[in-house]
Amino acid sequence: MTIWTKIHKFVSNVGRMKRNIKKQAQYTSKEDTQPFVVNDNESVYYSPAAVTFSPRSAHHLIQQSRHGLPVFKIESYMNKYGLTLKEIAAILNLSERTLQRYDSSDVLSKESSDRALHLQRLYERGEDVFGSLDKFKRWMKSPILAFNNNNPITYLDTIFGFELIEQELGRIEYGIFA
């Protein structure tokens, strides 16, 4: 790798770091805004996961999961992310009928809340990678070769599906299409 390639990579990553730090500011305090930078012999890069979700925001997510999310949050996720009752029920590992029985003020279980918060985080990351929420929503409901020509949204019924989609977002973010 030439020095000019290294410089180009570094400058590109610095721009991306600045954008992510601005986005992070809305989730964390000023003391948590230092990006996680790795400097090896080949290149300088950072971990977007370390920048976007600080330990402080992780603690906040854990507390929200433990206390349970109110059902009205799930209704807002359905509207914001364009999800059907059937899709959100599969993601939360609940039956459609059980989800329909909940009142807006009811609170979800720890497991369902955890999945809902994971969904929110995934869609925020997808919006960041694709540049718009609408583009990410279309991608989630389109057949993708990396998912055996299935829609990525059908993989959200398991934690492994979430991980697979997050890995694919990382590949897209860094231009690795395989």
Image (tube, rainbow, N blue to C red):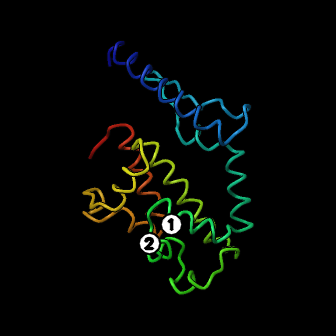
**Residue identified by numbered label 2:** 84
Residue occupying image coordinates x 65% and y 74%: 104
- Residue 31: image x %, image y %? 74, 31
What label does residue 78 carry, if any? 1
Residue occupying image coordinates x 68% and y 55%: 61
- Residue 72: image x %, image y %? 63, 69
Image side of residue 120 versus residue 58, left or right: left
What label does residue 138 carry, if any? none
Assign a secondary structure to mark 1: helix
Image side of residue 52 versus residue 134, left or right: right
Examine the image and state in which quarter residue 150 appears: bottom left
Image side of residue 167 versus residue 177, left or right: right
Closer to the chain start, of discs 2 and 1, is 1
The total number of labels drawn is 2
**132 shown above or below 35:** below
- Residue 164: image x %, image y %? 41, 57
Image side of residue 118 versus residue 62, left or right: left
How packed is label 1: few (under 14 Cα within 10 Å), some, or many (20 or more)?
Answer: some
Instruction: Give how far apart the Cα atoms at labels 2 and 1 are.
Output: 7 Å
**Residue type of the residue flagged with mark 1:** Met
Residue occupying image coordinates x 57% and y 85%: 98
Residue occupying image coordinates x 52% and y 31%: 19
How packed is label 2: few (under 14 Cα within 10 Å), some, or many (20 or more)?
Answer: few
**Residue type of the residue flagged with mark 2:** Thr
The residue sitting at the top extreme is: 3
**107 shown above or below 56:** below
Assign a secondary structure to mark 2: loop
Q: Are marks 2 and 1 in contact (CB under 8 Å)?
A: yes
The N terminus: image quadrant: top left
- Residue 148: image x %, image y %? 26, 63
